[in-house]
Amino acid sequence: MSRIGGAALAAVLLAAPVWIWSPYHLHILIMAGIFAVLALSLNLLLGYTGQLSLGHAAFFGIGAYTSALLTLRLGWPVWPAFAAAAALAGLAGYGIGRVSLKLRGAYFVLVTISFAGVTQLVSVNWMDLTNGPLGLPGVPAPSLAVPGLFRLSFVGKTAYYYLVLAVAAGAYFLCHRLVRSRIGRAFIALRENEALAESVGVEGTRYLVLAVVVSAALAGAAGSLYAHYTRFVSPEVFLFSYTVTMAIMVVAGGKGTLAGPVVGAVLFTALPEVLREATSWQWQMVLYGVLLILIVFFLPKGIVPTVAAWLRERRAPS
Amino acid sequence: MDTLLQHLLNGLILGGTYALLGIGLTLIFGIMNVVNFAHGEFYTLGAYGAFLFLTVLRADFFVALLGAVALGVVGGAVCERVLLRPLTGESIDTTMLVMIGVWIAMQNGELLAWGGVAKSIAHPFPQAPLVLGPVSVAPLRLFVFGAALVLIVASHLLIRRTRLGKAMRATFQDRETAALMGVDIHTIHTVTFAFGSGLAAAAGALLGPVFVVSPSMGDLAALKAFCVVILGGLGNLAGATLGGLILGIAEELGAGYVSSGYRDAIGFIMIILVLLLRPSGLFARAERVG
């Protein structure tokens, strides 16, 4: 993207609460931002190292519960709870990575699914800690205060939008720096040809575990953002449909690109809202399944790479 | 002691159907190199198939079971022919994503077709349990176990003793060489997927009357099938059979002695433990089918 394009995009996003006056549309944009963080997080694994995690809802849920429990039960302020949510999810990612990344591919998928299954069962059954299926209401909204000067509360949608935008931009730049670095090149090398990468000294398992840790921490941060936005956490945060939605966003947007997951996140947060008017939730999910199949068949690279290639081709002859 | 025996028996009966699920999945993975995330949906298809034949077509119970299996076989064949054959040679991730799509579409299709309310399947067996010394068992469960056992033995015979089974094993060992020797790989793939899906449908039709039938029943079934396959080692038929029985017994014991709320976590924990300690499966010598 050119510098002017980037600046224009930033201006449009920063001014969004001005031109989007409906709180409902702003809500969709906030959710899109949270999902963009999730999609970026999954993309780090699926797109750059080639390992598919189908347990990302677990890291999301761990983040949401950590943040909610620390603020509700221990009275922590939101910001350290946010950091702790990312850290704990990252720690869980470390454990999962160490266990499963000696093996790759299908095994990794299965371990991540199992892990998500266990965490969901724990959230339902450990009544004392999680309040079971009833969930945890009254999660506080974050606020920013400099004593004696000002106090900014993120209760309103506009303020929360800027918070989510900041975190999403932070996640984007973190991923950007990471994949352009030596570490990112190691990820890609492992995806393309592991044996060859190892032969030039890239330690496969170590880098893959690192990818899982960063990815899980990002998902945990998204979970914390979600908890403090909806102000309510229940075992539903572990729902498999969250993971599926993330996977569709990454694959449809374009895995292995940075813009792809973000485009996918915006598109697939808005699409269900548009479809909601027309069809029921079940039809939507059927459509999601069919869409995933169609994308694999007809847009295997995803939307962003396909559009980018098309634009290059158009520009080339002139 | 008597409770322990009872738990063991219940576990064994449950394990028989887990083994059916696992065998289908392990064959599909071993021979086609496809991680079939839609496996649980063929299980659901079998259960609803049985329900459909019984209530709408008013078929006999046993005919309905056969009809359900046939539905699974045909559904599997169609799925392989339409979605997987065009992707032959694509990476395992690609087919996995397609199967995830099939899973979501099928599950929500069931939800649309049948609604979210669980259905129960009527069966002709007496309700009174059979008392065998210290343990008792419902006649229906005994039938389910017997039928599962027959199907397991039949699968082993098919793979080990028939010409088709030999072709399947050859395809597993070396696809190219098998093709050069005149094995029609495409047909083997279709047959394998149809056979595996048929076994899953059989498990669903058999367990449907024991529990209730609901659109999301396949999710847990699929996870258990994956657990069984990992316990036994990917592509290992005998391993899947034993793995199924072990999982069934472990779940019964866990639910009986630890906590019934965590019954479904036992499979997950076993997956993680096995991958940690013996990643090639509990019974692995070398990777093989049969």
Image: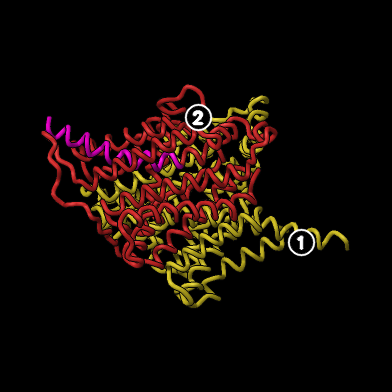
Chain colours: A yellow, B red
Q: Nearer the viewer, residue B98 or A234?
A: B98
For residue B261, side relative to residue A247 (left or right): left
Q: Main secondary structure of the magenta part?
A: helix
- Can residue A128 be seen from the camera position used here? yes
Q: Is residue B53 above or below residue A238?
A: below
Helix, strand or loop under label 1 = helix
Task: Write down the residue under mark 1.
Answer: A311
For residue A223, side relative to residue A168 (left or right): left
Crowding at mark 1 (Cα within 10 Å: few <14, some 14-19, many 20+): few
Span shown in magenta: B1-24
Task: Write down the residue under mark 2.
Answer: A102
Q: Residue at x 48, y 42 (%)?
A: A109
Crowding at mark 2 (Cα within 10 Å: few <14, some 14-19, many 20+): some
Q: Nearer the viewer, residue A267 or A295?
A: A295
Residue B227 lies in quadrant: top left
* Disc 1 residue type (three-letter): Leu
Query: CA–CA distance between discs 2 and 1?
Result: 41 Å
For residue A312, side relative to residue B134 (left or right): right
Residue B21, percent from left and from top: 40, 43
In the image, farthest residue toward the top: B285
Dividing the image into 4 quarters, which one contains the N terminus of chain B?
A: top left
Q: Chain of mark 1?
A: A
